[in-house]
Image (cartoon, helix red, strand yellow):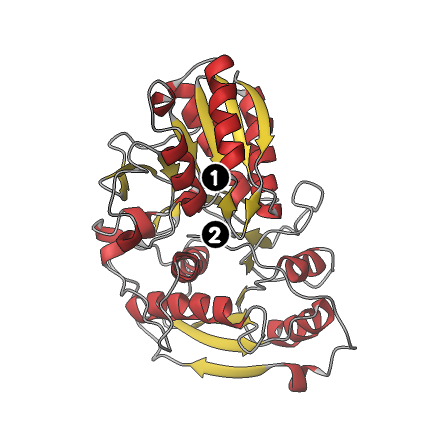
Amino acid sequence: MTSPPPRVTAPPERKPPPPPEESAQVETFAVAMPGTVPEGQDAAAVPGQTVRIGLMLPLRSEALGRAADAVRAGFMAAWERDRAGFEVTVVETGDAAGEILSTYQSTLAQQDIIVGPLARSAVTALAASPAVTKPTIALNHPEDRDGTALPPQMLSIGLSIEDEARQVAEWAAREHPGANVMILSGSAAWQDRIAKAFAAHASQVGMATKTLELTALNGYLSDGEMVALRARLAEQPVDLLFAALDADQARQLRVALSAPPLGDIPVYGTSSLNSGRVSLYQGAELDGVKLLDLPWQIQRDSPTVASYPQPAPRDEERLTADMERLYALGIDAFRVAREIALRPGQPIALDGVTGQLSIDFGNGPARMKRVEPTAIYRNGVPVPVTAPLTTP
């Protein structure tokens, strides 16, 4: 993988939003109204009535269309599996925040639960508006996650590379208490975000860090800098490395540090170290590297993951690991919406395909925590670590 799990943003607004009927196209999937709720489920939703879900996605967007389609496919796959009592309306949106607000307001009157928007700018605009009066499951986080308060009826379930970095810091601190860590980062914005999130949390869990930004030309690390890094680590040893890099760069790093004793330094990272392109890793260069990733990517044989169909590309272009993660996000988005409808106001614990989800919705500000499983490279493939990752 040459990019991290996508955290999508919309392009700047360039024109006033059109009226709702022009900005949104809808596709409705209706179901017969059931008389019962599946065994083991609470009947919080009124028996015999259909829960209407509006799925808002920029399906024709040049910037976000493929990502939106991956989310839609996952959402509909989950709905097909547990469709009884739920009606899904896919609402096509524009990119601009103004269009999103207009479409949201028109959709709100016809739906019981809204899922979307997808772009961070759209989530930010919606969170700042007074429009959110029904359960709304945002597919991303607001741009200023720490400074933007979400309305009580809004829950964000977006994937987060920063959250992954913080979980990796806790994992590394448990295995190497008080460790001296070198953070290796490229110059890309997402790499800087990972590096900063790890560094900030590492200091809170008792580790000392220093960051080195590496030069990457066309994605490849500088040979000269790799030589300098070997010399620096020989003179100033560290307990472990955190690689805020992509999979190809991590492979170059491991090759450069393969000779003992540098080859024995533990390396940790996020899901950015898993490109999903297994065929490219036929050697052992990444073996021993530890990372986090979604169950969808590293626990494909688990009962939960195996119960959903694998995504299929709509053209000859192979699905990337990023698109597969968004497909998984779509699956969990429907499952979360379903749980909120069936158990209003109750805590939700979900064995999700994007991680173990703990959700509190309907009792003040909504909260969600996602814990992703740990993995280690073996024979060129990331496989689950036996002991699960837990967080305080």
* Structural crowding at the residue carrying mark 2, measured as other residues with C-alpha within 10 Å and reported as few (<14), some (14–19) or many (≥20): many
Q: Residue drawn 61% across and 40% down?
A: 192
Q: Is residue 47 visible?
A: no
Q: Residue drawn 59% across and 28% down?
A: 211
Placement of the C terminus among the 4 image quadrants: top left
**Which residue position holds label 1?**
164
Count of labels shown? 2
Picture quadrant where residue 330 is located:
bottom left
- Residue 252 in the image: state x and y as whole percent: 41, 40
Marks 2 & 1, CB-CB < 8 Å contact: yes
Q: Give the Cα distance between marks 2 and 1.
A: 10 Å
| Secondary structure category for the residue under label 2 | loop
- Residue 286 in the image: state x and y as whole percent: 32, 38
Relative horizontal placement of residue 133, taking residue 86 as reference (left or right): right
**Up-down relation of residue 94 to residue 278 (above or below):** below
Q: Nearer the viewer, mark 2 or mark 1?
A: 2
- Residue 371 in the image: state x and y as whole percent: 41, 39
Q: Which amino acid lies under the numbered mark 1 shown in the image of this protein?
A: Glu
**Which residue position holds label 2?**
5
| Secondary structure category for the residue under label 1 | helix
